[in-house]
């Protein structure tokens, strides 16, 4: 289970509880510079994330093929890894995977990582924020900057990884980062895929609509494909 930008493994806690109650083993890493993982302050593109995940899987002696679940960047990492190492994958649950991040979103995030980010953090104002926003502010600035530099111009509408395992997409209708119509385009490009759109949900659809999200999550975990 792989979280997205500015999050941490803890974001999956409700889903972990559901799965462990049913006897599943959950491997839930923090990406570099997030949560409890250190930031080596290297250039951090997709290859670095793939190497980190492979190292984590080897350390925990995961039995393959396995089910991978990702949110946003975690979905990107999952699909990219599945294209390179298909033998590891039984299926992918891809939540809020951006097909092409809107230019305005990239510019806004770049601006936020300038003075506003440092100003908010220097006075500790973020300690009073809600969980998602607080965790974002606790994430390494370098790691967040690397997301902008390495993923700001991604385009999976035209360059989707060649994945052979089943991929199950879910996206919030109101998601400003993973636009629902972009996710629909990716779904059409992958013949062995499904798509669920959750109404009145944004990028963190598991938070705003936990009921529909968890139903989708468990349905796809248990589906034969």
Image (cartoon, grey):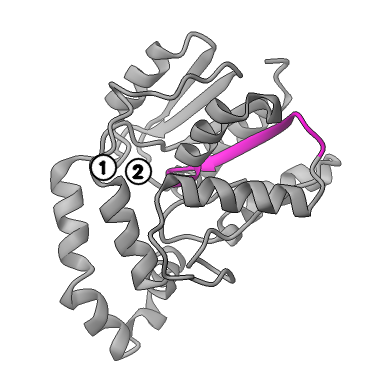
Q: Position of residue 106 (x, y in %)?
A: 20, 50
Q: Residue furthest top?
A: 191
Residue 202's label in the rendered image is 2
Let me know if residue 92 is in the magenta part: no
Residue 218 to residue 2: above or below = above
Pick the quarter of the image with the C terminus: top right
* Residue at 81% over, 41% down: 24
Q: Are marks 1 and 2 in contact (CB under 8 Å)?
A: yes
Upstream in the sequence, badge 1 or badge 2?
1
* Nearer the observer, 20 or 101: 101
Q: On the rendered structure, is 102 left or right of 135?
A: left
Q: Position of residue 155 (x, y in %)?
A: 28, 31
Q: Position of residue 177 (x, y in %)?
A: 29, 42
Please provide the residue range marked out in magenta: 63-74
Q: On the rendered structure, is 182 left or right of 197?
A: left
Residue 176's label in the rendered image is 1
Among the 4 quarters of the image, the one containing residue 189: top left
Q: On the rendered structure, is 81 left or right of 110?
A: right
Residue 57 to residue 172: above or below = below
* Nearer the observer, 204 or 178: 178
Disc 1, SS: loop
Q: On the rendered structure, is 122 left or right of 52?
A: left
Q: Residue furthest bottom?
A: 123
Mark nearer the viewer, 1 or 2: 1
Residue 214 to residue 57: above or below = above
């Amino acid at each position: 289970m792989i979280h997205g930008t500015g999050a941490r493994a803890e974001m999956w806690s409700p889903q972990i509880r559901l799965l462990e109650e049913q006897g599943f083993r959950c491997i839930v890493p923090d990406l570099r510079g997030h949560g409890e993982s250190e930031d080596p302050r290297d250039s951090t593109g997709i290859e670095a994330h793939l190497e980190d995940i492979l190292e984590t899987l080897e350390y925990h002696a995961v039995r393959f093929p396995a089910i991978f679940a990702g949110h946003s960047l975690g979905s990107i990492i999952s699909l990219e890894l599945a294209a390179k190492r298909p033998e590891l994958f039984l299926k992918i649950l891809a939540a809020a995977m951006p097909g092409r991040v809107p230019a305005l979103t990239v510019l806004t995030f770049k601006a936020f990582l300038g003075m506003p980010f440092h100003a908010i953090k220097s006075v500790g104002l973020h300690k009073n924020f809600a969980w998602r926003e607080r965790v974002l502010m606790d994430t390494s600035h370098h790691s967040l900057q690397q997301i902008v530099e390495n993923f700001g111009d991604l385009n999976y509408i035209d360059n989707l990884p060649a994945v052979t395992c089943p991929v199950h997409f879910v996206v919030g209708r109101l998601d400003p980062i993973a636009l629902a119509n972009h996710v629909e385009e990716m779904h059409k490009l992958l013949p062995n895929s499904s798509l669920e759109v959750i109404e009145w949900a944004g990028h963190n659809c598991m938070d705003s609509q936990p009921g529909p999200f968890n139903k989708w999550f468990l349905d796809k975990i248990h589906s034969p494909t």
